[in-house]
Amino acid sequence: MKVEGIDYTRLYDDGMEIYPFNDNVYYVNTDNNGDVNLKFYARKLASGYITKVAISNIMDDITSSLQENALFITQPVIPSNSLEAPIISSINGSEVPPAGTNKNPTFDVIIPKSTVLSMNDLVYVMSDINDETPILCSSDRYGNRNIRDNPFKVPYKIFTPYQYNMLYYYILTIGGDISRSKNLIFTVGGDSTSYLPPKGNFQLPTILNYSNKLVDEFFIFGVNSLGTGITCVIPVGGKNEAGVGDIIDCMLEIISYDSDTGNPSPKITLITSVQVKDTKPIKIPIGSSFLENFGVDDEGNPTPVYIYYIVNKEKYSQNWQGFLDTVSLDSH
């Protein structure tokens, strides 16, 4: 494998760094299916840079192109007021419908027309919710899409159903100038079988019971142990924690099951939104009314509950998981 156009790449194969043999040529092994799991990183230099590179595969002296216009960025690019957010054709309010019965693996994304765009500009449609490395969704020359009115096809599998996602795009000119669009924040719908609880990189909240004592994760709440409710404690000011000025949404998810199909059915509740004023941990009460009257399924399993928070409607925390068996005997 060869990387052309940059002398500062680092290549990782499933977490292990691979060093170039000669002239940015790397030897890599494939699995039994001929696939490789590679990540490219740009080396950090004293000053940031933006460049376009070409990645090719060499086998038996035959070179085939893998990516002609890969984009390496090692400096922050601030969203431009002159580039509007991308448009998702099928969006309804802030939600993109799920793939549906036809199981279409992609949805359509349109780049708004703008006088600052040239037909030869390269467009990179991106997402980086909860990822250390931004994800490239699709790329092409602006003219190829604009002239033919041909939308970008963005894979559903990049995004987690039911949680906030972010979409934006970079514009790279022939002269090497880079611009970034405004962000589009949205959610993706999903059928119940595709549900996964949100999980991000921000620190796990801690949970206190009604007596202000720490509750271990995976604890099963009964009517008595639930008492008047619980408290969610959100850490602030440290690594992978919210900072002063951030907006925090405290979220509660309870997963019940359809009695006919057995599929999970998430009930998602926003408990409250608060702005971080200082670096003291934020305590958010969750009253018992949110957690009462959830029982066990036919196999005796209690109801799963997840508690997490979202920072600035973009970054998710890890989720705290517990269980509920809070149906009062009086209700039978």
Image (tube, rainbow, N blue to C red):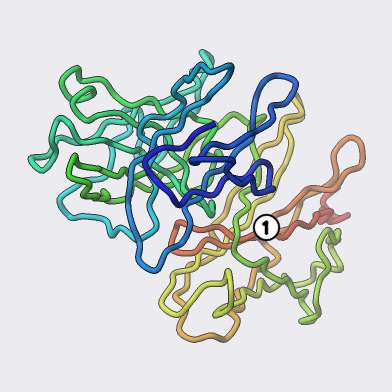
Quadrant assignment, res 75: bottom left
For the point 20% across and 42% down, which residue is it?
Answer: 173
Q: Residue at left 43%, top 44%? A: 127
Q: Position of residue 134 (x, y in %)?
A: 46, 48
Residue with the mark numbered 1: 319
Q: Is residue 21 above or below residue 76?
A: above
User: Viewed as shown, does residue 306 lie left or right of 275?
Assistant: right
Q: Secondary structure at mark 1?
A: loop
- Give the percent coordinates (x, y) of residue 199: 63, 52
Name the foreground residue: 137 vs 259. Answer: 137
State the image coordinates of residue 34 (x, y, percent, origin top left). 67, 20
Residue in the picture at 76% in, 76% down: 210
Q: Is residue 308 left or right of residue 210?
A: left
- Residue at the extreme top of the image, as rendered: 102
Q: Is residue 323 left or right of residue 318?
A: right
Name the quadrant of the N terminus.
Answer: top right
Q: Amino acid at mark 1?
A: Asn
Residue 116 placed where, x, y %?
10, 43
Q: Please tell me in which quadrant of the rendered image residue 252 appears.
A: bottom right
